[in-house]
Image (tube, helix red, strand yellow):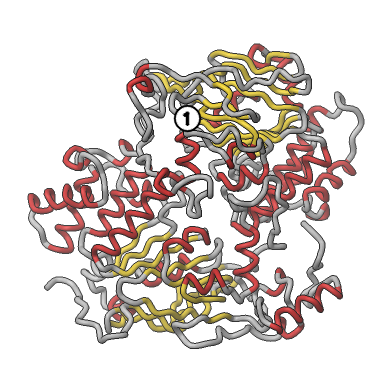
Amino acid sequence: MRSVGVGALMAGDPLLSVRDLHVRFATERGDVNAVNGVSFDLHEGQTLAIVGESGSGKSVTAKTLMNLLPRSARVSGEVTYGGHDVRALAAAGTKHFFGVQMTMVFQDPMTSLNPVKRVGEQIAETLRYHLGRSRSEARSEAVELLDTVGVPEPARRVRQYPHELSGGLRQRVVIAMALACRPRLLIADEPTTAVDVTVQKHLLDLLDDLRRRRGMSMILITHDLGVARGRADDVAVMYAGRVVETADADTLFADMRHPYTEALLRSIPRIEDPVHHRLDPIQGRPPESIDPPEACAFAPRCAYAQSDCLNGVPELDGLLGLHRFACLHPTGTERGAAAMSANQAAGVTAAGMPVGGDR
Amino acid sequence: MAGSGRAQLRGRDDVLLEVKDLVVHFGAGRRRVVHAVSGVSFDVAEGETLGIVGESGCGKSTVARAIIRLVDITAGEVLFEGRDLAGLEGEELRRVRPRLQMIFQDPISSLNPRRRVRDVIAEGLAVWGDDIGSWSHDRIDELMEAVGVEARHGDRRPHEFSGGQCQRIGIARALALDPKVLICDEPVSALDVSIQAQILNLLQDMKRRYGLTVLFISHDLAVVKNVSDRIVVMYLGKVCEIGSTAEIYSRPAHPYTRALLASIPEPAAAVAADEGDIGDELPSATAPPSGCRFHTRCPRATEVCREVEPVTEPIGDGDHYIACHHPVAVDITARSR
């Protein structure tokens, strides 16, 4: 056995569990707090979508799991995978864990593939290094893998170079590489952001199908709430390095509580909206992650903000696995409604943002 | 789809920009030719917003660039204010360019990083100032405030602003010369979701305030629907379908338009989810398919589609044209709009 295996999980035990993860980068201008206390569980066969904008910490969280952060990153917190302490495995330089048990697909297939190597060789390389396959075994397995991910004429395609393939096919090759060692967990970081909508649909269908057939778990990282809605069992919404709301997908979209989740969903143009429908944007822009004030990070842009939002960071309330949100005046509650009407009456929030205007 | 034809040209008096049989070829070495745009026709009335949608490689950005002559036109006409831009050269071309301005997808790389943003916005005025009458720095302040960037930040350089702020600056630069036509090439694709809506609303406000006619290019069908009065759907350098936004979204007749509408994560109600299954292999633009260029992926394709190129024809009784041998039945008895 060349890889760190996962024993049979106890019933109800998660495959992956993350507790109070913090990631900090030292820069010339000061420490950047990229991830500030993220916790979640992922069960076998489930898909968790992590949704956020650039700078929310969603990709840094994924890279932490995969041990892909630069040395300058300071990490604290616990990551457990099938009973193993993932950060200890990383520190021990364990060879056949990352990329075997747990693999990742990145946004841009062109940068994850070696441009001067035939795609078949790139897949075979993984099989030979991690699983000790012979040259010929690896070659025929590469063809099978391309077939599995829906690449037409796989026997011909293995001999091609990345530039000879379309964007959609390249991303399929990357997925084939990620699947080569039969991972239990696949992390897909914006896997369809660089491709067209027609291709996006096929790739998401493929990932979903593979997850089901192979009983894999998946973390889908995306900025697109629409993608999360259709494809995930659970959704975690991140803002400024924190999970601000998390629930199963149906609950989150039907009964959201965090004003950021609500504002994000409202700001997106939807295909069923009337033509020239005036959009409802989120005011301002995401906060700096250097020296953030001890306050709710969304408060400056939040129509519900009260003075207590500016004194301390709200906790993510509720039990792990249930609907949790970090907000003192949640939307859809009496407290939220009271906060909103107070702000509307005043014409301004406690953080000084005008309410009721437009722009 | 994959059609030529001019049936969609309306010939109205208020048409400001008319593109007729536009062809753009690029050389690809070894005597190969990329057929980027192959006989595209449409018109844009004054004050209208025309959206152009399609997958990457469909030629939508090339059409936009050809109109303002950022790429060479192989054949066809671009009529603007009674003149054919395709034939203009030298000083004549230079003089017409301030009338058509463009904003780009990547807001940061489209601004010169070494210059202060005030100078970036003012550059066109500094060049053209004598020709368009007097101007002063008040004009720059006014533009900056109009697009939502504080004028006191005018001495900063582009890297000191976020992507959304840079796109606002790009819009101010485009508006400085008081253009008639604003061409927006994927203006919000590189922006965060929460910022996209701000920029889309700003573009609507600027359109009203400065009386602009807009060409809006995007791959995002929901964004295009939001901003456009009329839509052109393109595929591999050809027009598939063109018409009023309401028609295209409520009664899409071209199989390709329907596939696009079915592919988005939350598909449009007018189409069935399986209509998005058209494969993900775009044929090469160096050797485009015969007949209808979409036939290799089209679920309705027959022999005639492989052999005969469809031309645009009106469909239904609204503002709606389609180039397809087998359009999806549109209920023409339904109330138009």
Vertical placement of residue B334 versus A328, above or below: above
Q: Please give left or right for residue B291 compared with residue A341 in the image.
A: left
Q: Residue at x 47, y 30 (%)?
A: B327
Tag 1: amino acid:
Pro
Vertical placement of residue A264 versus A82, above or below: above
Q: Nearer the viewer, residue B292 or B288?
A: B292
Q: Residue at x 20, y 57 (%)?
A: A126
Vertical placement of residue B315 versus A214, above or below: above
Q: Nearer the viewer, residue A80 or A278?
A: A278
Indicate the quadrant containing the N terminus of chain A: top left, top right, bottom left or bottom right.
bottom left
Residue A199 horizontal/vertical position (percent): 40, 45
Q: Kindly tell me whether residue A232 is visible in this rendering.
A: yes
* Quarter holding residue A77: bottom left
Instruction: Kindly state the secondary structure of the residue where label 1 is placed.
Output: loop
Q: Residue at x 33, y 45 (%)?
A: A170
Disc 1 crowd rating (10 Å Cα; few below 14, some 14-19, many 20+) is some
Q: Residue at x 36, y 28 (%)?
A: B301
Q: Label 1: which residue?
A: B327
Residue A5 horizontal/vertical position (percent): 19, 76
Q: Nearer the viewer, residue B175 or A199?
A: A199
